[in-house]
Image (tube, helix red, strand yellow):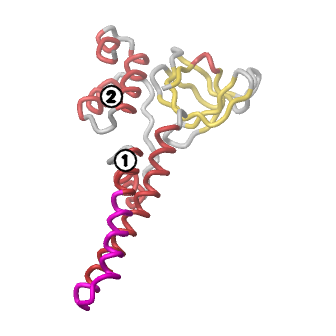
């Protein structure tokens, strides 16, 4: 659908559909390429705030698998740790016991890591906090009121993060950290 909208030169709809496709297949290189390509066509160039390297690594590591896959891994690691612990208790050779103890400990730690990854990945999967601006241009306000101060202007195709709702207004944050309010009819949810 994103390709069709791109060929029809409907940039906001193309971005919206590529973002939806990315939620379904986060590691698809074609979707990522098409999204980068279509983002070159929008007017506003918003540079995201750089993240610390270890936060980026953590997000990439957690994003490798879906929450369901992390759950399967967590159960598998936990059961393996239990089996290793049972073998540790039943065997008498000191070297084998030490190895089984270390193996069971590592498997238990991997299981706990997997549980943390489940929570984070599930939170990401369930958060529907993204939207695309569909208005040709919209003034971002300082408060949810048409008479409030204009902070800056956004053009169609910009991705925003949704923070709050008041009546017919949405509080948004851009990837560069700017925050403001826009009317709800100017955006479509990813």
Q: Secondary structure at mark 2?
A: helix
The relative height of residue 119 versus residue 178 in the rendered view (above or below) is below
Whether the residues at callouts 1 and 2 have beta carbons within 8 Å, the answer is: no
- Judge left or right: residue 112 versus residue 129: left
Left or right: residue 124 versus residue 152 is: left
Range of residues picked out in magenta: 76-97
Give the quadrant of the N terminus: top left
> Looking at the magenta stretch, what is its main secondary structure?
helix
User: Would residue 110 appear left or right of 154 to someone viewing this image?
Assistant: left
In the rendered structure, find residue 63 and report the number of the disc placed on it: 1
Residue 112 falls inside the magenta stretch: no
Any mark on residue 50, and which?
Answer: none
Q: Earlier in the sequence, mark 1 or mark 2?
A: 2
Q: Position of residue 125 (x, y in %)?
A: 46, 39
Q: Nearer the viewer, residue 152 or 57?
A: 57
**Residue 138 percent coordinates (x, y):** 58, 20
Q: Which mark is residue 35?
A: 2
Q: Nearer the viewer, mark 1 or mark 2?
A: 1
- The residue sitting at 30% across, 77% down in the picture is 87
**Where is 126 relative to 105, above or below?**
above
Within-10-Å neighbours for mark 1: few <14, some 14–19, many 20+: some
Quadrant of the rendered image containing residue 109: bottom left
Residue 4 sits above or below residue 169 on the image: above
Task: Sort mark 2 into few (<14), some (14-19) or many (20+) by Cα contacts within 10 Å.
Answer: many
């Amino acid at each position: 659908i994103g390709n069709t909208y791109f060929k029809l030169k409907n940039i906001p709809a193309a971005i919206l559909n590529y973002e939806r496709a990315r939620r379904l297949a986060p590691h698809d290189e074609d979707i990522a390429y098409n999204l980068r390509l279509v983002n070159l066509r929008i007017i506003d160039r918003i540079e995201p705030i750089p993240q610390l390297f270890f936060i980026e690594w953590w997000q990439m590591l957690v994003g490798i698998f879906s929450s369901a896959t992390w759950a399967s891994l967590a159960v598998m690691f936990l059961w393996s740790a239990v089996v290793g612990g049972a073998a540790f208790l039943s065997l008498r050779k000191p070297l084998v016991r030490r190895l089984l103890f270390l193996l069971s400990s590592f498997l238990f730690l991997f299981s706990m890591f997997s549980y943390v990854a489940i929570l984070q990945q599930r939170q990401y999967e369930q958060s529907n906090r993204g939207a695309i601006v569909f208005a040709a241009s919209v003034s971002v306000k300082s408060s949810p009121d048409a008479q409030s101060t204009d902070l800056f202007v956004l053009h169609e195709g910009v991705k925003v993060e949704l923070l709050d709702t008041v009546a017919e207004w949405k509080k948004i944050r851009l990837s560069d950290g700017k925050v403001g309010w826009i009317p709800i009819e100017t955006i479509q949810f990813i």
